[in-house]
Amino acid sequence: MNLADIKPAIESVTASLIVTDLRELTYLATYPGMISIGAAGEVANDVKFHQLSTLVYGWMPRIARIDPSHTSAAVTALGEALSASEVNYKLVRIKSISDCLHSVVGASKLLHFANPNVFPIWDSNIEAFRKISDSDITSVSKYMDYIDEIHGIRREAEFPEFYTKFSGAYSARLTANAIPAYSISHIRAIEAAAFELAR
């Protein structure tokens, strides 16, 4: 996936500003609140991990399955994720989180809400859009490849122009659906564009 692949999302969003699917409306309306909770404060114990995990699973069709034998390592990894940057995100022990939740997709959502500037949301829709031959949404290494790809797109020379246009279309969609406009990170813009085109 590259920038050229996701550019059509601008037109797609602009052409369908009104959202009638209640699940999609819920995603749009709850996103800023999820981010504010995820990125707030330190991870001193398992309470924040439990709160964020159950919050994230409100965006998923499955019930959270938190494995207590992995919680301590997952809490440590969440702390790493909160302070991660584009430079050091590969040091975050994502597998500890996915082992605790029994889901790499769930881990990707938790990581995104903890640090939306670094970690993109990943799921089967995104993988269908990417058309990766050896796709495996249960693989942490495949999720890492996806993160690398997203950051590569963000570094493309034409990305700032894409981001401005996509963010404008996204804000127009929010306004058209009576949702107060909010800004999204570069990483969220790329992932949301891919998701838009995957539908």
Image (tube, helix red, strand yellow):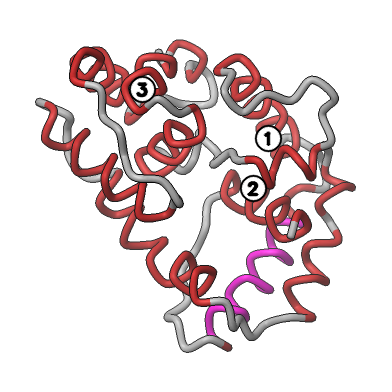
How far apart marks 2 and 3 lie (CA) works out to: 20 Å
Q: Amino acid at mark 1?
A: Ile
Secondary structure mostly seen in the magenta stretch = helix
**Which numbered disc, 1 or 2, marks the residue that appears first in the sequence?**
1
Secondary structure under the numbered disc 3 in the rendered image? helix
Check residue 191 in the rendering and tell me which mark sits there, or answer none: 2
Q: Is residue 46 magenta?
A: no
Q: Position of residue 11 (x, y in %)?
A: 83, 71
Provide the residue span drawn in magenta.
162-175
Q: Amino acid at mark 3?
A: Ile
Q: Is residue 181 left or right of residue 186?
A: left
How far apart marks 1 and 2 lie (CA) works out to: 8 Å
Q: Position of residue 103 (x, y in %)?
A: 45, 28
User: In terms of depth relative to the viewer, which is nearer, 167 or 51?
Assistant: 51
Check residue 183 in the rendering and tell me which mark sits there, or answer none: none
Residue positioned 25% across, 14% down in the render: 70
Q: Position of residue 161 (x, y in %)?
A: 77, 57
Check residue 97 in the rendering and tell me which mark sits there, or answer none: 3
- When the figure is inspected, residue 31 is found, relative to residue 188, above or below; the finding is below
Secondary structure under the numbered disc 1 in the rendered image? helix
**Which numbered disc, 3 or 1, marks the residue that appears first in the sequence?**
3
Q: Are marks 1 and 2 in contact (CB under 8 Å)?
A: yes
Q: Is residue 29 left or right of residue 186?
A: left
Residue positioned 82% across, 28% down in the render: 132
- The residue positioned farthest toward the right in the image shown: 4
